[in-house]
Image (cartoon, rainbow, N blue to C red):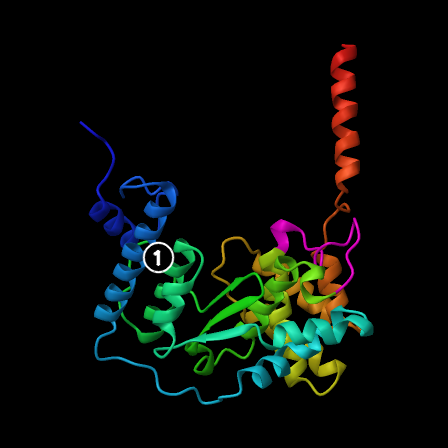
């Protein structure tokens, strides 16, 4: 008796967990035929379930139609502070078009066309959360933003959030810096400078939360003293639900940034790798040395 689940089982599992079989064994045919049929059935079921749960509900039109202008205004201080002048325009051009607000008008094409099944499921939950309805699974993440490559998907809850130290756009844009290679935006790469910014893997969320809070402080403060006062307020009131982040560390980074001439550089230095990434040649030489040592023993 075969243990291979049926296509219906796979669809039900996907809707509940966002997980899929990369081999698409539940569908007949050669691999590409199976993959195409699985994509059609899984995503079709996802759209129908989202449509069912959101029946009778819809977002109003966005209060601000010019997404590029909104995004650029939010991220420009961060880009100016983190990149040399000759690179700033290229980075801003990419970030300016990076934000996609997930709305009733675009949710279905986003779900059907996204390249990854798991990400499409996450976007579906982001959208459902913005409508205040039940998510697809018990363990579904309740997100307001998702960054992948050079695209930031942002919930329309962005326009209703009243946290003075929260800015989803800045947070998700900060993730682009470690997701995007320099060549992607037309900047020169070297063996040791491949990504827009080198961020320690374990500090990626710390970096994003620090940038988010510091950007909000800069937008409100009229001078250094007020920056420091707002940083102290943030440290006393901030509550972060992200398990990978130490709130006290973020507060400390933000406080140091608020006291510096260029706080963005402080944030970057506090979240940088402890050692520089090695080139492919250096890694190869290291493997030769290990092999040579093993032979000598």
Where's residue 37, x and y in %? 30, 51
The magenta stretch is 187-203
Is residue 131 found left or right of 12 in the rendered image? right
Where's residue 177, x and y in %? 65, 62
Residue at the image point whose x is 64% and y is 78% from the top: 217
Is residue 192 one of those drawn in magenta? yes
- Residue 247, above or below 62: above
Where's residue 7, x and y in %? 23, 46
- Residue 64, above or below 268: below
Residue at the image point whose x is 37% and y is 70% from the top: 109
Q: Which is nearer the eye, 174 or 99? A: 99
Is residue 126 found left or right of 72 in the rendered image? left
Mark 1: few/some/many CA within 10 Å (<14, 14-19, 20+): some
Residue under numbered circle 1: 140
Quarter of the figure with residue 73? bottom right
Name the quarter where the C terminus is drawn.
top right
Name the quarter where the N terminus is drawn.
top left
Quarter of the figure with residue 267? bottom right
Residue at the image point whose x is 71% and y is 88% from the top: 222
| Secondary element at tag 1 | loop
Our reading of the magenta stretch's main secondary structure is loop
Where's residue 83, x and y in %? 77, 69
């Amino acid at each position: 008796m075969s243990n291979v689940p049926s296509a219906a089982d796979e669809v039900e599992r996907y809707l509940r967990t966002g997980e899929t079989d990369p081999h698409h064994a539940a569908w007949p045919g050669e691999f590409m035929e199976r993959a195409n049929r699985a994509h059609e059935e899984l995503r079709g079921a996802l759209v129908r379930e989202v449509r069912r749960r959101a029946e009778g509900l819809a977002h109003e039109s966005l209060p601000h139609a010019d997404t590029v202008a909104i995004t650029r205004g939010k991220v420009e201080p961060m880009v100016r502070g983190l990149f040399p002048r000759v690179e700033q325009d290229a980075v801003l051009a990419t970030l300016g078009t990076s934000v996609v607000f997930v709305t009733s008008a675009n949710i279905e094409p986003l779900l059907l066309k996204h390249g990854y099944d798991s990400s499409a499921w996450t976007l579906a939950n982001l959208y459902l959360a913005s409508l205040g309805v039940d998510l697809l699974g018990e363990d579904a993440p309740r997100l307001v933003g998702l960054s992948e490559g050079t695209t930031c998907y942002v919930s329309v809850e962005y326009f209703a959030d009243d946290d003075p130290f929260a800015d989803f756009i800045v947070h998700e844009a900060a993730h682009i810096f470690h997701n995007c290679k320099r060549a992607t935006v037309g900047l020169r790469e070297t063996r040791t400078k491949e990504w827009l910014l080198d961020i320690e893997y374990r500090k990626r969320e710390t970096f994003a939360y620090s940038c988010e809070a510091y950007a909000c402080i800069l937008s409100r403060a009229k001078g250094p003293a007020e920056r420091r006062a707002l940083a102290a307020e943030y440290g006393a009131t901030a509550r972060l639900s992200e398990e990978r982040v130490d709130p006290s560390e973020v507060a400390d980074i933000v406080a140091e940034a608020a006291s510096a001439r260029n706080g963005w550089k402080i944030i970057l230095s506090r979240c940088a790798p402890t050692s520089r990434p090695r080139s492919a040649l250096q890694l190869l030489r290291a493997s030769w040395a290990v092999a040579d040592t093993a032979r000598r023993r």
